[in-house]
Image (tube, rainbow, N blue to C red):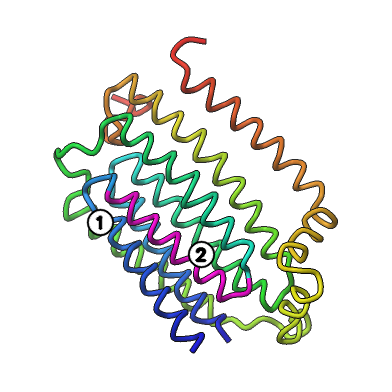
C-alpha cells in the first residue's frame, strides 16, 4: 500500500519535473516545479519526515517559488517569444550527458548501507513516538548541530544584505 | 523498504535538473533546474535518514537554508543583469569571452 502511494507520487514528481524543464513559458515551468515540490513533500511524509514535508511546502513551494514567480512577472518574461531551448546539437549533448549521469547514479544507488552503521528498522518511528515529530529533529539541531545552525543564520543575514545591495539601482 | 524507489526517483529528478541546465538558455529556468537538483538530493537525505539516524533530516534543513539564500542572491543578480542588458538569456552574457 505504502509502496503504491510512494510510486504514484514519485511518478507525479518525475512527470512534472519533465514538464518543468520542457515548457517554453517560464511561468508554466515555475508552476510545474511547484507540483514537483508538492509531490516531493508527499514522499517526505511517506519516509517518516513529516516536519521536513511541512517545511518543504512552506519554504520551497511557498516562499522560494513565489520569489521566482515574482521575478518572472517583474521582468515580464511570460510574453510569447522565441524559444530558449537549444538546437538539436545542444539537445543531443544534453541527452548524452544526462544519460551517462543517470547510469552512474543507478549504479551508485545499488550500493548497500553497511550493516554496522545501520539502525534497526523502526528506530526513527520509535524516536518520533518518544520525542515527538518536531522534537526528534529539534534535539540534534540544537544539540549536535548547534554551530552549523548559528552559521546558517549568518549565511541568511549575508544573503539578505547581498540581495538588497545587488537589486538596488543606486546605493 | 522505500529506500531503493526513493533513490531511483531521486536519481531521475537530479538527471532532469542537469538536463534542464544543459539545454535551456533562460537564466531563471536554469535556476529552477538547480532547485530541482537540490530537491533530488534532499529526497536522498530523507530516505537514508530512515536507516542512518536523524542527522539526514537535520541536513535537509541546512540545504533549505542555503537554497533560500541562493535564490535571493541569484534572483537579485538576474535582476541586475536584466537592468543592464534587457535580457536574461545566457547567450547575451559573454562579457568575459575573448573577441
Q: Residues within 10 Å of mark 2 (few under 14, many from 20)?
A: many
Which residue does the numbered mark 1 point to in the structure image?
A22
Q: Looking at the image, which is closer to me, B74 or A70? A: A70
In the picture, the disc for residue A47 is: none
Range of residues picked out in magenta:
A28-48
A6 vs A134, left or right, is left
Which residue does the numbered mark 2 point to in the structure image?
A41
Q: Residue at x 40, y 48 (%)?
A: B32
Q: Secondary structure at mark 2?
A: helix
Q: Position of residue A151 (x, y in %)?
A: 74, 41
B64 vs A123, left or right, is left
Q: Residue at x 21, y 49 (%)?
A: A24
A144 vs A1, left or right, is right
Q: Residue at x 54, y 62 (%)?
A: B41
Queried whether the magenta region covers residue A29, the answer comes back as: yes
Q: Position of residue A102 (x, y in %)?
A: 41, 70
Amino acid at each position: 500500500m505504502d509502496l503504491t502511494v510512494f510510486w504514484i507520487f514519485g511518478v507525479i514528481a518525475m512527470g512534472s519535473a519533465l514538464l518543468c524543464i520542457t515548457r517554453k513559458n517560464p511561468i508554466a515551468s515555475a508552476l510545474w516545479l511547484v507540483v514537483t515540490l508538492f509531490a516531493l513533500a508527499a514522499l517526505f511524509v511517506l519516509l517518516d519526515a513529516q516536519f521536513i514535508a511541512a517545511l518543504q511546502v512552506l519554504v520551497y513551494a511557498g516562499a522560494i517559488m513565489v520569489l521566482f514567480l515574482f521575478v518572472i512577472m517583474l521582468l515580464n518574461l511570460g510574453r510569447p517569444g522565441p524559444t530558449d531551448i537549444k538546437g538539436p546539437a545542444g539537445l543531443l549533448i544534453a541527452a548524452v550527458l544526462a544519460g551517462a549521469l543517470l547510469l552512474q547514479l543507478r549504479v551508485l544507488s545499488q550500493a548497500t548501507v553497511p550493516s554496522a552503521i545501520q539502525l534497526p528498522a523502526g528506530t526513527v518511528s520509535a524516536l518520533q513516538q518518544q520525542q515527538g515529530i518536531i522534537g526528534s529533529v529539534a534535539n540534534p539541531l540544537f544539540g549536535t548541530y548547534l554551530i552549523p545552525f548559528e552559521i546558517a543564520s549568518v549565511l541568511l543575514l549575508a544573503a539578505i544584505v547581498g540581495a538588497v545591495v545587488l537589486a538596488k539601482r543606486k546605493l | 523498504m522505500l529506500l531503493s524507489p526513493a533513490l531511483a526517483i531521486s536519481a531521475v529528478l537530479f538527471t532532469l535538473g542537469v538536463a534542464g541546465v544543459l539545454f535551456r538558455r533562460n537564466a531563471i529556468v536554469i535556476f529552477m533546474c538547480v532547485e530541482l537538483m537540490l530537491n533530488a538530493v534532499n529526497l536522498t537525505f530523507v530516505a537514508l535518514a530512515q536507516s542512518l539516524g536523524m542527522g539526514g533530516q537535520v541536513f535537509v534543513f541546512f540545504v533549505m537554508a542555503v537554497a533560500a539564500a541562493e535564490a535571493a542572491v541569484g534572483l537579485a543578480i538576474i535582476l541586475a543583469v536584466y537592468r543592464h542588458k534587457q535580457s536574461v538569456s545566457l547567450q547575451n552574457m559573454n562579457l568575459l569571452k575573448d573577441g
